[in-house]
Amino acid sequence: MAESDSRPVKMLRELPRKGQGASRAYTAAAGAGGAGGWEPVRIVASARDLDDPSKYCTKEGERRPTFEGHDGECREDDILTSRKKAELLQTIIPSAIKLHAERLLVRRTESRLIVPRTITQTKCRHFTVPEEHYTDGVPDADAVLYLAAGPSVMFAVPCVTAEEDDRPTVGAMNFYLSGVFHPWFAVRVAAHELAHVLGFTYQQMDAQKMVRTVTAGSYGAKSGLVTSRLTKEKAQEHYNCGSLEGMPLKDEYDELSRLRSHWDRRYAKDELMGPTVATGAGFYTALTMAAFEDMGFFKANFSMAEPMSWGRNAGCDFVEAKECEPDDYTKFPAMFCHENSSDTTLYCTSDRVALGLCSASRSDKCVFINPSPFGSCRNEENTNLHGSRLGAGSWCLDGDSLKVNVERHDPEPGVVAVAAVCAEVVCTRDSVKVRYLGDGDWHDCPEGGFLSPASTSVDFAGGTIKCPKYEEVCTITPSGRSGVKLGSADNDNQGPNNNYGPDGNGGPNKNDGSAVAVHVGALVLAAVAVVVAVATPL
């Protein structure tokens, strides 16, 4: 599976040529020579529409293109400030590209990528394509992404495929600024959308004869199952079910009544290609990598697969259920919960990024811990989270009989019982250290162990903090990059191999091998759930 190719992936900025202006393009590339002719995919992002003030919001109330064929009204959170623009172009997009370049390999061609003028007949027609991309072509590129940030929903669309193998080579993405509230989240959302551009769409998989339609749900609705060889094999491994026929796609439809392009959330809530990244971590697992390889024009580097605890080893009982059921919490308590309207206790979400309530989803009736609007461990403005230490490197950790001292206006001091708290986490190569509220020291926190915060912090009155599994807090860094390191001999589906601190840029003895300088700034926008979408190519 081309796993021997461990050369470092570098992020390069394409300098503008004379007369091109200041448009920016980025590419992820590796050194020459790959296993069997397969080399890391080179992705160039062209952002001319971010250099033209008439194409993005500069103030509230003005109207700007949505890149869907009409204009939309700008809100405050739609404004592309210089800080947001720098965050997008210097951190988010390069990091998203790197996630794919580290995992997907292609057979490169020597020639430049020429963008055909027929692109004007697709949804990419609303994006600015530099004239030289039509004439001279784009050098050192296996795929080109046209990027914009209009006041619209976030979407991505593939527009052009290669003649020789039908691999998508040109696409576009509108980055929805209003829905992004942290660089970690933004990177994973961008990587999700970029996956659609690279070919993770129902239409592409159907054309490759990877999908079988099955009847699912209590109303006989039609659903899709990716049954191609490698995807089926990796799904069987993940769920520990040898009779599993394939990986379920989300039962949803677009305007043409065709299945869309996400894994079903019940089975892959925290996966990169789940339907709602806001309620899942976005792990780039072997499931998505296998789907790309089954398309025929990619090879996957499975040593870079990110582990996901959701559904792992859940067995055939879990995957054979076609929809969420009221008693799921009794059979799979690690994933689902029992909804009780009178229970206002905040628990950790499955991705440990936030605290939330046990509630049912309106779309699929699945009951699990949904993040509270003010429950993010990364947002330091969430002052209502008792006992929590908030910050860019904070994660939600479970408690056991945990009690927190709180200040009240009453004469008597108050003590509040909490089920979980946010705490800063630093990952070294093989261990986790935790720093909780009221104590500036780092404490070793081995898996299966616990900490007694009341012994060192006046903010706690009793109880313990449970130490998390290493992979749960070390697979994705706070900046959105992967904690799984390229070329590590012990990486093969064994989890991350990290050294990073609470800012995502390096903890004690940092040695992450990254060639990307990631700036973890405060891209703090509306803390709302974002349902990512893929537009149907025209």
Image (cartoon, rainbow, N blue to C red):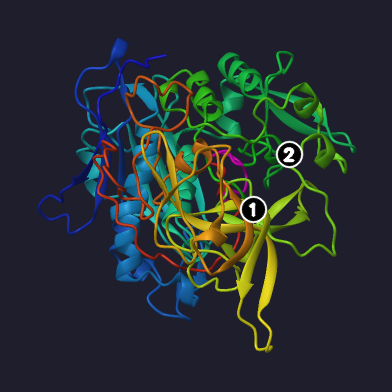
Which element type, helix, strand or loop, lies under badge 2? loop
Residue matched to label 2 = 251
In which quarter of the view is residue 235 placed? top right
Mark 1, residue position: 399
Q: Position of residue 153 (x, y in %)?
A: 55, 59
3D distance between C-alphas at marks 1 and 2: 36 Å
Image quarter (top left, top right, bottom left or bottom right) of the N terminus: top left
Q: Secondary structure at mark 1?
A: strand
The residue closer to the viewer here, 235 or 468, is: 468
Q: Does 203 appear in magenta? A: no
Which residue sits at x=30%, y=19%? 5
Category of crowding for the residue at label 2, using alpha-carbon neighbours closer than 10 angstroms: few (below 14), some (14–19), many (at least 20): many
CB atoms at circles 1 and 2 under 8 Å apart? Answer: no
Tell me the magenta residue range: 270-277
For mark 1, does the 10 Å Cα neighbourhood hold few (<14), some (14 to 19), or many (20 or more) residues?
A: many
Q: Main secondary structure of the magenta part?
A: loop
